[in-house]
Image (cartoon, grey):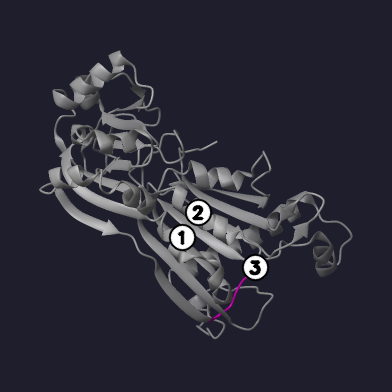
Amino acid sequence: MNSNKARLSYDAIVPSSVPTQPSFLQIIRDHNLASQVQIILPTSSLASVNLSTLQRFSPHIWQLECPLREFMAIPAFWKLVVRGQVAIISETQLDHQNVMAILGGTLHLSLLRDTYEQCGLLGEPIKWSVPHVNDSGARLQQRYKVKIDLKTISAHESKRLKYALQEGALKESFPFLVSMPQSTWSSHESELSESMARWSGLIKSQTVVEPEIIHRSNIKCPSWDMPNKESLKQELSTTTISDELWRECFQEWALAIDEWAQLMVLGSDRVRASDNIDSYLSSYTLDSSLEEGQELTHIQWTGVTSSEFPLAIWNQLADVSVPWAVLITHGVEDLPVSWKDHQHGVFTSGENAYTVVKLNNTVNVSTGTTGAVLCSEVIGVLDHHF
């Protein structure tokens, strides 16, 4: 069985006033938590990216070990959690442990059968999870999912939850990661002082995520222009291009851009214009419309953050002054739900990621569209998000 599946899409950038937004924006918004966000753009366009503004959205992160009920003990903090301004995840493993997360004001639990039966909460079996013996010979249990909207929780459901957290199977301590945007922390720092004082003995680390900026010179870039049917006809000396051939050419072009972007963020020398490695050692080649090397900047933020942060980055990259740009987001692997409320699974990998590429600027006055976007996603084999 393949561990992941991939999906390619091609969209237009549209003004925010347009009611129907393209699917790539839905992908960014619906992706629950990222563990790392990266961008690539021409160094000449770096001034268009306001890092000070983006820092307001970047995450402030705490790691602590405590029972889940501890977060409910301080009203000021819990109010932010219920409003969806704070994300909480247990740092446990989805393939064989109980996993908890509060995202957008909703509690998501992925529980082993024994825990589920003891906690007294109402849920349902996870379809892809069946009892089985893993490679180490350990027998793994059926998993169950529980979803509770903390904003609209009923009195009866609230009693069940309190029992599970105070007396039931979820009363034990777990390692947790708490993430909130810098702007939320700055606005509520005085209110949250009680939380910090109460948790002084529980907090293991506190991190303010800062950008890491890497400048790379003499980089050979791929073609940002989608293959043209007319040029393909001339190149192949034919009068018609079949749909099958067109799809094949589009896929090769799109995958070449995605492969180039991944090599860029890895710091590979294969993307340098001066690279002359022996073809027996590396078969990578890049068909480029620009032979000369370019000055590029790679910026990365490493730390768990909600979709608000990559969306804020995209809003700056979408500016017409940036000719092209790449946004790469890697999701948290051990999260009960990867996109919106859709269940996430881990087999050989819990990878969930997407790459959004802003292509060369073109303006269509009649439709109001500005530019085009190529989006590629890596999704768990049993995951989906639409």
Q: Quadrant of the C terminus?
A: top right
Q: From which residue to which does the magenta span run?
A: 218-222
Q: Residue 174: horizontal and vertical position, in percent?
A: 18, 40
- Residue type, numbered disc 1: Thr
Q: In which quarter of the image is residue 41?
A: bottom right
The residue lying at 63 percent from left, 59 percent from top is 254
The residue lying at 31 percent from left, 46 percent from top is 188
369 relative position to 185: left or right: right
Q: Looking at the image, how many numbered discs can be counted on the residues?
A: 3
Residue receiving disc 1: 53
Please tell me the numbered disc located at residue 312.
2
Q: Is residue 221 part of the magenta span, yes or no?
A: yes
Q: Residue 231: horizontal and vertical position, in percent?
A: 82, 66
User: Label 1 vs label 3: CA separation?
Assistant: 21 Å
Q: Which numbered mark, 3 or 2, is in the foreground of this view? A: 2
- Residue type, numbered disc 2: Ala
Say above or below: 151 vs 361. Answer: above
Q: Is residue 149 part of the magenta span, yes or no?
A: no
207 relative position to 224: left or right: left
Magenta span dominant secondary structure: loop
User: Label 1 vs label 2: CA separation?
Assistant: 9 Å
**Do tag 1 and tag 2 residues touch (Cβ < 8 Å)?**
yes
Residue at the limit of the structure toward the left, as seen here: 201
